[in-house]
Image (cartoon, helix red, strand yellow):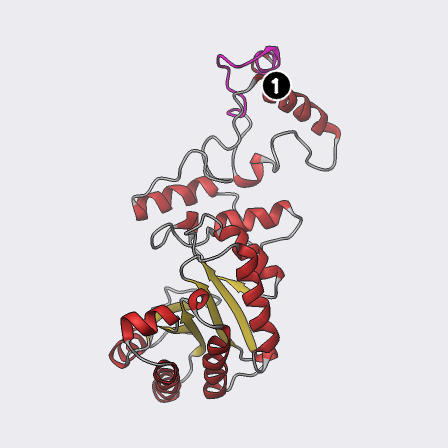
Amino acid sequence: EGLVPDDVWIQVLTQCREPLILRTIEGVKGAKNVVIHVYNSTSELQRRVVFKKDREDIKNLALESVRLVKKLVDERMKGTNVRLEYSPESFTGTELDFALDVCNGVVDVWEPTPEQQVILNLPGTVEMATPNVYADQIEWMCAHIAKRDSVCISVHPHNDRGTGIAAAELAMMAGADRVEGCLFGNGERTGNVCLVTLALNLFTQGIDPEVSYVELEETIKVAEHCTELKVPERYPWAGSLVYTAFSGSHQDAIKKGLEAIKTAQVWEVPYLPIDPQDIGRHYEAIIRVNSQSGKGGIAYILE
């Protein structure tokens, strides 16, 4: 019906279960660009406690599912651009040699090329260690995966330890090509990595995230309406108080920084790492007179 722009990819997620895969394929018929994402848990804990299956059984489940997707795509999705994505769920709890074995098997079945890469998503389904350990795991997989030039390494950090952003940043430094996350860290338990925070972190380091947040306020309104979850006032970059100073010394420094920036070419204002106007905020709310304000804050308001 022409509701999806031609340059937009629809991504669908399904477990490695035949009835769900069949239903998923049916649901995206007619779409122009589709990422079909299949997953099964490979972790030692879930193999032993949840599925009561050995490594070979879990690997076969993944490969049989990828074979089915490939067959259905060939038969039922002519004219659609399809990319396969596979996740060894709970990658952080999976032995690296087994994760590699399963992922290499998926690559062999799908037969990707440098022009038509397969996405291998290595999720921190549960944060189980420090971010540098996750980055080490990603680096090891990047170094050992077969047909690396035909593989897009994706990461999907969660925030159980409160370090999802750091895990994503270090994983990219370790060789990851792609990050999956949610707006404002929505998701299971403590949430997925926040794409707003991640993008603006990159922006402050001189890296263009190729995402525009000039209408961040509208993004917040839509996210809050859809999820019924409020973005906290002190949420990184997006919170309503992030660019507001209450301390007198901070207010004085910001006032002087804003005066100096009028003749400068580069944004350098104490306590304000980015220009609030870059994300659609204004200067009016930066300084609020209160019991902690000094003469600098008062002078700013009076001017």
> Label 1's element?
helix
| Residue 177 visible in the displayed image | no
Could you tell me what secondary structure mostly forms the magenta stretch?
Answer: loop
| Residue 105 visible in the displayed image | yes
Quadrant of the image occupied by residue 34: bottom left
Q: Quadrant of the C terminus?
A: top right
Q: Is residue 198 left or right of residue 181?
A: right
Could you tell me which residue is drawn at 54 percent across and 25 percent down? 286
Could you tell me which residue is drawn at 66 percent across and 30 percent down? 269
Q: Quadrant of the N terminus?
A: bottom left
Quadrant of the image occupied by residue 232: top left
Q: Percent x, y for residue 189?
A: 34, 52
Total numbered circles: 1
**104 to 153, vertically: above or below:** below
Q: Percent x, y for residue 2?
A: 37, 67
**187 to 86, vertically: above or below:** above
Q: Farthest residue in the left direction?
A: 19
Q: Percent x, y for residue 283?
A: 56, 27
Q: Is residue 205 magenta?
A: no
**283 to 106, vertically: above or below:** above
Q: Is residue 293 magenta?
A: yes
Q: Which residue is mark 1?
A: 249
Q: Where are the magenta residues, as a range?
A: 284-300
Could you tell me which residue is drawn at 56 percent across and 72 percent down? 141
Identify the amino acid type marked 1: Ser
The one nearer the camera, 206 or 176, is 176
The one nearer the camera, 92 or 20, is 92
The one nearer the camera, 204 or 153, is 153
